[in-house]
Amino acid sequence: MDASAMLDRLAAPETRANPFPLYEQVRELGSVLPVADTLVLVTGYAAADRVLRDRGFGVLDREVGAAMFGDEPQPRSWELFGRSILRNNPPVHTRLRGPIASVFTPRRIAALEPAIERAVGRLLTAMAESGREGVPVDFMDRFAFPLPVGVICELLGVPDEDRYRFRRPAHELTRVLEFMSVDEDMSSADLAAQELSGYFADLVTERRARPQEDLIGALVRLRDEDPEQAIGDAELIANLVLLLVAGFETTTNLLGNGLALLGEHPDVRAALADRTLPVADFVEEVLRYDSPIQLTSRIALRDGLSVDGVPVPRFGEVLVLIGAANRDPARYREPQRFDPWRAGNGSLSFGSGIHFCVGAMLARLEAAVAFSRLLDRFPAPTLAPGAIRHDRLLFRGYGELPVTVS
Ligand code: HEM
């Protein structure tokens, strides 16, 4: 397969539906595979981990983008992410990540557990009502979306009444991060960027007027106490939007992918229900086997870099296929098998290195509470016909997932 055929196949709808066969074809050609002068695909776990930790490789920030593409104006959605920690390299990344990580503490996350329990309980009761007498309910709509959006909004301090308006704009906005999205029409993502940044700009103004003990309040305070060093206003808003969209789109997909796997593996369901399998081990295996984030990308920031002997020129791109690395046979025994009993899981689903996911602990907590309470309430949730996957590669998850619960 030549380079352009390979890229066409990565971008193809059948790959978005099920990328795993293609990953294996790529791996057969090499776990670090040059597909063009300036593009390398990585499917190997160790190589992926090394690239993500290597400071010689960075994300496509505004400076790198200007050097690569000139200073043509970028879509608004791209600009917005360009001010967030996700799309900045040190020293900007270090400056922004510090304040965010400092309010995103284990204590603050652990303190959310009772609220998560309450939200899970409410959503399960509502599902039981709608699913009486075997009527299928859409798990995505009734549970996998509202739980994480409620939790991240609680953490950020977004008022209750606004929480359900974010599903469409957040989903639209994340299109800009998708593989091969550069040539696509980004107007809906740009509109979403405008809507979400406008929303958070108003909320920041409101928190300044009436300070509160939530994450927005804490970040506003950090910003105002040290306007020189800390996070700027535009950066503050971009990172709040990032926390919102990263905080639920991914977790929503983790919950959906996990429920689908539960439906396909009654032995796992039984072991979880009788507590012989720890729910945390199930969650780790869902993350490995069907990662909500399937890939990320890094750019060589200087000359002379290579990955496992494959040279990457300055501004060359390395596409790190997280979903493939998580199934590397050099790292996992029987990697294509869903096996929550496997030892030493440690997948790359939350990334690695300086961009390691700030929300990993929160996502794990939500999923653990969700699946244990779900099985307490419905010991045998059954998949009903009509499941629809999102037509996405990077954000892997379901748009609809009908289940019967009674
Ligand atoms: C199952 C759920 C989640 C998955 C699979 C996931 C995955 C990831 C991955 C792979 C990265 C690194 C991207 C890269 O290196 O290019 C990342 C970064 C990030 N995640 Fe998550 N995430 C999840 C949940 C969350 C939650 C709940 C939040 C917030 C509350 C969050 C906020 C972030 C942020 C802010 C970053 C950027 C960190 C940085 O650039 O320094 N994520 N996430």
Image: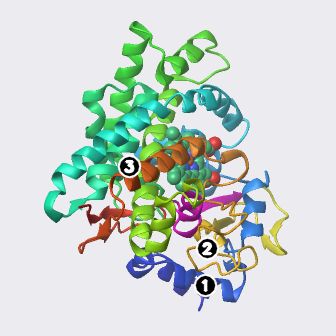
**What residue would you read off at disc 3?**
173
Image point 79% across, 51% down: which residue? 55
Neighbour class for label 1 at 10 Å: few (<14), some, many (≥20)? Answer: some
- Can residue 397 be seen from the camera position used here? yes
- Can residue 189 be seen from the camera position used here? no
In percent of width and height, residue 390 lies at 35, 66
Q: Nearer the viewer, residue 167 or 213?
A: 213
Picture quadrant of residue 183: bottom left
Q: Earlier in the sequence, mark 3 or mark 1?
A: 1
Picture quadrant of residue 218: top right
Q: Which residues are magenta?
A: 282-300
Colour scheme: rainbow
- Asked whether the beta carbons under mark 1 and mark 2 sit within 8 Å of each other, the answer is yes
The amino acid type of the residue labelled 1 equals: Glu
**What residue would you read off at disc 2?**
324
Image point 57% across, 56% down: which residue? 69
Is residue 286 one of those drawn in magenta? yes
The amino acid type of the residue labelled 3 equals: Leu
Image point 65% across, 16% down: which residue? 228
Residue farthest toward the front in the current orientation of the protein: 274
Position of 400 with respect to 157 (left or right) is left
**What residue would you read off at disc 1?**
24
